[in-house]
Amino acid sequence: MGMDASVAHVVLRLVTSLSAAMYTMSAVLNVFEPHVFTQGVVAFYMIAAGLCVVVTEFSPFGLDKLMRAFPFLGGYCGRGVSYIMLGTLSLGREMGTLGQVAGSFMIISGILAVLMHFVGDSYGLHYRDPARTGDLRRYEDNLVSGEPMF
């Protein structure tokens, strides 16, 4: 028996959020104790990416803003490939054990997201491209009117 799509989506979201939290925490530690200059720069990128991952997974309001710059995060495949690429940033020895574990979990989240794209449906993804749907209202506008956009 296969896993229900809603359960699989919740599990994927939990794994991704935990890995993003560890990922951001390891990046903050590396900002304060960089071994080399480039490690500090990469850590700043990791902090920004970790926060974007959390926003992508949990905040429809933030996702509306983020989708304007990164529309590929609207589907499982785009998210998965992004998570895999971000996870590789922290696999270096200088990132420490926490960074390596967080990067590994981020890569696992990415692989699961890509699999969900091909195996499951897009259940739970709360972003639809307004240009494709013809509904050019912003998410915030719908909060005021009370009319659900999604």
Image (cartoon, rainbow, N blue to C red):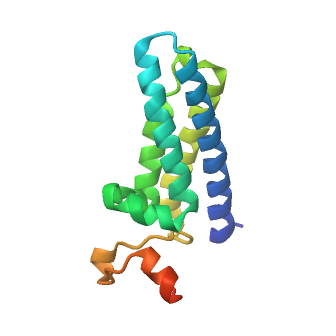
Instruction: Give residue 135's position: percent from left, percent from top.
Output: 33, 83
Q: Which residue is at 48% across, 44% downward?
A: 83
Quadrant of the rendering where the N terminus is positioned: bottom right
The reply to whether residue 110 is visible in this rendering is no
13 w.r.t. 4: above or below: above
- Quadrant in the rendering for residue 130: bottom left
| Residue 23 on image: x %, y % | 59, 35
Q: Is residue 141 above or below residue 17?
A: below
Left or right of residue 8, residue 85 in this image:
left
Q: Is residue 18 left or right of residue 130?
A: right
Q: Where is residue 107 shown, x and y percent of the image?
A: 53, 39
Q: Nearer the viewer, residue 123 or 36?
A: 36
Judged left or right of residue 21, residue 131 is left
Horizontal and vertical percent position of residue 49: 47, 41
Seen as rendered, the residue at the extreme right is 1
Name the residue at the top extreme.
35
In-front residue for pair 68/82: 68
What residue lies at 69% left-to-right and 66% top-to-bottom?
Answer: 7
Where, by quadrant of the figure, is residue 42 drawn?
top left
Q: Is residue 100 above or below residue 142?
A: above
Eyeballing the image, is 28 above or below 2? Answer: above
Q: Residue at x 61, y 28 (%)?
A: 26
